[in-house]
Image: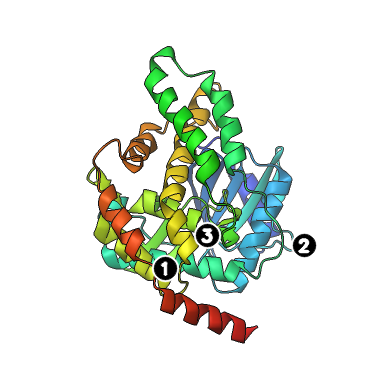
Amino acid sequence: MAVYTLIDRKELEDIIADYALGKLVLNGDSGSSALESHYLLDTSKGHYLLKIEEVKSELEVKREIDLLLFLKKHGFPCPHPIADRKGRHYRELGGRCVSLYKHVGGDSPVAEDLTLSQLENVGRVLADLHLIGKGYKKGIDNRFSFERVWELYRDVREKLPSYFRKIIRTLDEEMDYLRFYLEGKLPKGIIHGDLFPDHVLFRGEKIVGILDFEASCRGKFVFDLATAVNALCFAQGGYQLRRFEALIAGYESLRTLSLAEWDAFPNELRFSALRFTVCRMKDFYLRPPEDPSRMGKDFNEFYNRLRILRREEDGGMDGLLMAMATGYDYRKYQKVKAFEKKSK
């Protein structure tokens, strides 16, 4: 993908000087996402990543940086925002917010290449985020609540081609179903909201970085876990029980799911698949071709998952449902609750 905002060497040198990072040795673009452009900067004092926000407002940038600083302070492996000589963690450049981070080297394997040990570590680090995030008291609105996803779908539905009739019927049914069966009274806190393979950096089996907190907000922990399951435990055309068990084992080694969360898990999986189906439709059908945030990711990837979760197609859902039905350990949960109460 192209870098949307171009910065010449003189501008980069000025930025490096403001951060007191020595001399610029080498720079190169590292591509972009729908929301950002990235430059890798090698300086005489180390390696850094310059991030240029293509879409986000200044308020959104401030909120994300504030959360990252909180998480980094508590030892979580997230991007580390660097302050300049004046103590600023971002600046304005050409009408866009620019921030600088320490560069973390690592690999992001595709989902099918993740080992069971790596999946277990992902579960553990996700639980760690949820536990650390309990201490973060600032509110971050959930851009992907059911109500907001419904609004997105309502807008995109009018733009879908006529030959999408069957898909529209399925999405209509799913919206009607989830409206009544999503449980709102579940444990909440800071969630990542978008834990895909390319957002996790490994060195061997060890996780050295969790990236891209753009979707982070205050939301349901089990939804965050369901999104990770949809992204990481689906391989070879179906959900893989061993991968699911490894991810859950890592998660529950730090935070045990309650009975209510286990009961809600299947519907949270469905809602996560629905969210990414609708968002990918929106990012393609509601944006003009020249818009840098227009994405070409195939919505069918998660629409197909949704059909499996609705049990309209084969794909390993029976194994997941059985694991969810038998996964709750009442005695373990009671011990955890007793410990939390005693610690207060």
| Mark 1 residue type | Tyr
SS for tag 2?
loop
Q: Check the picture and name the quadrant holding the N terminus.
A: top left
Q: Earlier in the sequence, mark 3 or mark 2?
A: 2
| Residue pictured at 44% horizontal, 23% vertical | 168
What amino acid type should be assigned to the residue bearing mark 2? Lys
* CA distance for labels 3 and 2: 37 Å
Name the residue tied to disc 2.
Answer: 86
Q: Nearer the viewer, residue 173 or 36?
A: 173
Which residue bears the numbered disc 1? 251
The x and y percentages for residue 57 are 70, 42
Residue beneath the point at 49% across and 61% down: 260
Q: Amino acid at mark 3?
A: Phe
Q: Label for residue 221?
A: 3
Q: Position of residue 94 (x, y in %)?
A: 70, 38
Against 112, residue 303 (above or below) is above
Q: Are marks 1 and 2 in contact (CB under 8 Å)?
A: no
